[in-house]
Amino acid sequence: MAREDFHVGLEIGTTKICAVVAECRPDGEIRLLGVGEAPSRGVRKGEIVDFENACSCVREALSDAEEKSEIEIRSVWLAVTGSHIQSFNNRGSVVIADESGEITDDEILEVEYKAKEISLPRENTILHSIIQHYYVDGQQGVLNPVGMLGSRLEADFHIIHGVTNRIQNSIRCVKECNVEVDDVVVNSLASAQVVLDQHQKESGAIVVDIGGGVTDYIVYLDGAVRHSGVLAVGGDHITNDISLGLRIPITRAEKLKLEEGSATLGKSLPGDKIVLKNDTGFSGKEVEREMLNMIIHARVEELFTLLRKRLGDEVPQHLLGSGVMLTGGCSMIRGIREVAESVFEMPVQLTRAQAVSGPTSAFENPQFSTCIGLAKYGQAVRSESPDESFGGRVLRKFGRMFRLPF
């Protein structure tokens, strides 16, 4: 299969490293060719803290994906996350210099440059500048101003930035495996490519991707990205709470969370207990089901409350016609949708990658939403710039971003 026929998405997560090899067809369907996985070591809250261990896990996941897809992986689209990722909205404005008043690609590039002329911390770099709206002489609703006549072009952009060295650590980790990085993409933007359709973006929606160490979120209003960010709270925090609250080993707490736990309260029978069998270094124990659920509920409710406060006045709730979309591994906790609905006071859906074929266990699992979304993102970029070489794009210039309808 030719190199341009497939894309590889790689996510270096807190609990799992995932690599997806996918063929993205012109009709928008994604066919998974292979999914590689490896337990994550050396990663905390979505960021690398032990470089050698993390490299070893990435190498294992990529090898697994190569073996299953029977394709040699030379480059990947890399997801990045972490609490250092921040965003804001900004407007750029340029005067049309051409005597005819015709707007060209030069003005499009210049207005984006003007929007990015902001003061960031020295250690930060721009990851994405995503177009929201164009205005020609104050005219709203302009989709593509190229060729139009006017004296002033303005444009609103959503700017996402993060700490350069932390992002470079993830890139270097991949390059240690003799694999290039096509580009880096924030987790939430990648996930949104496959869990939202255009109608949902137009009507307004929040995508909340709950992983092991962090929760990524992105908000669409009127088809454009309005807000995005990362909360340093994830599924591992729930596991830690269970371990401390019930005084059981962390591995038992994780298994208990997934197999027996629920975020819903009041549905357990009085006196209902879960028996934990003896194991090496653990003498066994009985725990009350309602106590387990109380611990899970408290942390999940806290997560959604923090997120709602973070969104605050940035996102008028009455404009979110499609509500909240939950994805990521932690979205599989029983009862989590009901807690989210209670906090956000709007409809909530559990979602996963859409329009995907291949191994059912992969695309039906919300843990793979980001990786599959990376492949679709790559296809969109490739379609926009078919003649541009892939290798090392992100290493040449971090701030570059394609003018795509993300």
Image (tube, helix red, strand yellow):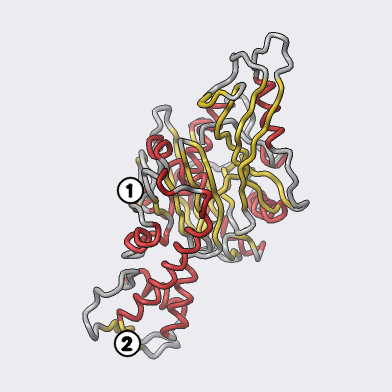
Image location (x, y in percent) of residue 332: 36, 61
Determine whether the residue tagged by mark 2 lies in a helix, strand or loop: strand
Image location (x, y in percent) of residue 42: 61, 65
Identify the residue at the far right of this view: 122
Residue 67 can be seen, yes or no: no
Three-letter residue code for mark 1: Thr
Mark sitting on residue 286: 2
Image location (x, y in percent) of residue 308: 47, 58
Name which residue lies at 64% across and 39% down: 90
Three-letter residue code for mark 2: Glu
- Circle 2: is it few (<14), some (14-19), or many (20+) Cα within 10 Å? few
Name which residue lies at 57% across and 66% down: 41
Name which residue lies at 42% across and 42% down: 204
Q: Is residue 194 left or right of residue 131?
A: left
What is the number of callouts on the image?
2
In the depicted structure, whether residue 346 falls above or below residue 259: above
Observer-nearest of 27 and 122: 122
Disc 1 target residue = 360
Mark sitting on residue 150: none
In the depicted structure, whether residue 130 falls above or below residue 295: above
Identify the residue at the far left of this view: 269
Determine whether the residue tagged by mark 1 lies in a helix, strand or loop: helix
In the depicted structure, whether residue 186 falls above or below residue 389: below
Q: Earlier in the sequence, mark 2 or mark 1?
A: 2
Observer-nearest of 238 and 37: 238
Rendering quarter of residue 336: bottom left
Q: Nearer the viewer, mark 2 or mark 1?
A: 2
